[in-house]
Structure formats: structure tokens, C-alpha cells
Image (cartoon, rainbow, N blue to C red):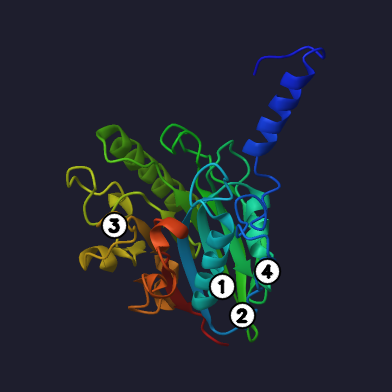
Amino acid sequence: MQNFTVKLVPALLSAIFFIHACGSSGYDPNNGNNNNGGGSTIEPIAKSDSVAPDDTLEAVTWNLKWFGDTRQGPSDDRRQTKNILQVTDSLKADLYAFEEVYDQGALDSLVKYMQGYHGFVATAYPRDQHTSFVYNTQTIDSVSSGIITEGQDEHDWASGRYPFYFSFKYHFNGTTVPIYAVAIHAKAGSGKDDYDRRKAAAQSLYTYLTNQKPDAKIIFLGDYNDDVDESIYNGAETPYQPFVGDQNHYLVVSKSLSDSHQASETNYPSTIDHITISNELFPFYVNGSVAVFQHAEDFISNYGNSTSDHYPVWAKFTVPQN
């Protein structure tokens, strides 16, 4: 940005106003373009009830479409927030991997309405679209989190949108299970270069998880931006073939959604949001539980424009009791 001298006060004030308008660290769904145009009091956003512990871990991946970015995404930020909360209140999941969250402030503006939950974004890379985790504090104890850079190429991961891990312990009724979750938001696009970058990224992540986390109970979920039966690029081999092909060590539980031609995006016919688990979690997975939550359209009008262009994809895992 060009520097201005102190004599140019109007220009300086305009620049400050512009920077403030473009920023989102102070994002509040009750501010900005959320008035009702009539000058009357706007009904406050209600907090959702806390979710009681049980022996089932529900894991969700959901791209929230530029959540918290006032320049892009749904035009009514307040309505988007309320709609997201309606969905999370319906799912009542323990773990959410959200993609396309602007920053920590934006995530906080959502999580403050989710009683008993805590959340954090991947802040180590300079992007407007961050991956994040939100979890039920009554069932999950956080251990550590961070981005995975070892063996990963910045260009392959959408110019620095690296995999984001969350190591935690799920506990219920005296039983504690360590889980290693990895959320991604892979390179978008249906061109060959996009495909090649997703393919290289998937291979590098597969190598890292297989070699560095051989005994971990892994949940690898997120916006894969491609399908796992065949690629959105000319029907080529899926870029996630390393995971799909290694059935001794991994199970892409959401592949059943691809096989049944279910869409996880409102404007695209393929399943591009997925959940993969390592063999250490095979006994925990509730068979047939993976689903695309398209039911959201039954109670949210104009869902694709008001909330997100992706549906939540989720799966369930039973925690064995001692």
C-alpha cells in the first residue's frame, strides 16, 4: 500500500476506513448488513442447548462458504449465523471441522452461541479461508493442534492451506479414546493443474500419516474438492487413490455416498466433502452412519444462497465401554 504524508488527512482517514471495512477480526453477525430496514429491535440470536455426553462420537465436515468475510459469501451474515446454528443444533455432533472460516473472531462469533463448545482456527497461514475445529467440551479434551507441513508442498495445498490437525481425547463413562483428526480444504477447480496439485497433496499427506502416525486413530475429513470414486477432472483416477486403494490401513467411509451418487454441494452433482478413517478406528465406526445432511433444506429457505453451497457430511463412532 502506498504511504501518505500526515498532510493528506482525508486520504488517510479514507484508507483507515477501507482497511477497517475489509477486515473481519471484529466480525459480529449482529452488525453490518443485518438490520431489518424498519428500525425496530432485531430478535437476538438464541444460544443452542449443550449436548450431553454419550458413547457415540459424531464427526462433521462442513464448508461454511466464506463465513465471517463481509465481502464474500451470503449477503446476510446474521441469517447465515442463525442458519448454521439451526443445523448444528439438529446434528448435535461432538466434533465439527469447518472450512472457509475467515478468522478466529468470526469463529468466536458463532461458537459463543453453542453452549458447551470451544473452537479454534488454523492461524499459521495467511489465508482468508481457514480450516477450523469446534468441539463439545463435555466429551472432548484438547491435547494439541497445528498445521502439518512436514513433507507437504505449499503450492499443492492451495498455496499454503495446509492440513490442520487436532489431537484430542474422547471420554465417556470412564473410557478415554485418543483421536487424531485432520481437516483439509484442498485445491479447488476442475482443470488438470488443479487435479495434479490435489493428487500430489493427497499423496504427501498419505505418506506422512502412514509413516508418522502408524498407530493413531485417525479421522481425516474436510472439503476434498474432488470425489473418491473418480475425479471431477475428466473422470480421471481419484487423487485420493492412495487412501482408497490401501484398504488394509484406511477406509473412506464416505465413498458409499459417491457410489450412490449423492451430492455434498448444492450446485455440483458429486460428493466432494469426505471422511476417511485409519484401521485403528474400523471397529468404532457405526456402519451406514455416514450421510450428507441435505435435510437442512427442509427447514432453511434458500439454503444454498443464505447458508452455504455445501451440505454437512457426518459419520458416527461408538466408544466401547470398559
Q: Residues within 10 Å of mark 1 (few under 14, many from 20)?
A: many
Q: Quadrant of the C terminus?
A: bottom right
**Are the residues flagged by discs 4 and 1 in contact, CB closer than 8 Å?**
no
Earlier sequence position, callout 1 versus callout 3: 1
Earlier sequence position, callout 2 versus callout 4: 4
Give the residue at x 46% y 59%: 306
Gap between marks 2 and 4, in whole Å?
A: 21 Å
Q: Position of residue 77 (x, y in %)?
A: 57, 55
Gap between marks 4 and 1, in whole Å?
A: 25 Å
User: How many numbered marks have been drawn onto this rendered protein structure?
Assistant: 4
User: Is 212 rendered above or below residue 17?
Assistant: below
User: Is 27 rendered above or below residue 56?
Assistant: above
* Mark 1 residue type: Asp
* Mark 3 residue type: Val
Q: Mark 1 highlights which residue?
A: 94
Q: Quadrant of the N terminus?
A: top right
Give the residue at x 35% y 36%: 197
**Are the residues flagged by discs 2 and 1 in contact, CB closer than 8 Å?**
yes
Q: Position of residue 211 (x, y in %)?
A: 45, 49
Earlier sequence position, callout 3 versus callout 2: 2
- In the rendering, which numbered label is found on residue 51? 2
Q: Nearer the viewer, mark 4 or mark 1?
A: 4
Q: Mark 3 highlights which residue?
A: 244
Q: Nearer the viewer, mark 2 or mark 4?
A: 4
Q: Nearer the viewer, mark 3 or mark 2?
A: 2
Earlier sequence position, callout 2 versus callout 1: 2
Q: Mark 4 highlights which residue?
A: 44
Q: Residues within 10 Å of mark 4 (few under 14, many from 20)?
A: few
Gap between marks 3 and 4, in whole Å?
A: 46 Å
**Are the residues flagged by discs 2 and 4 in contact, CB closer than 8 Å?**
no
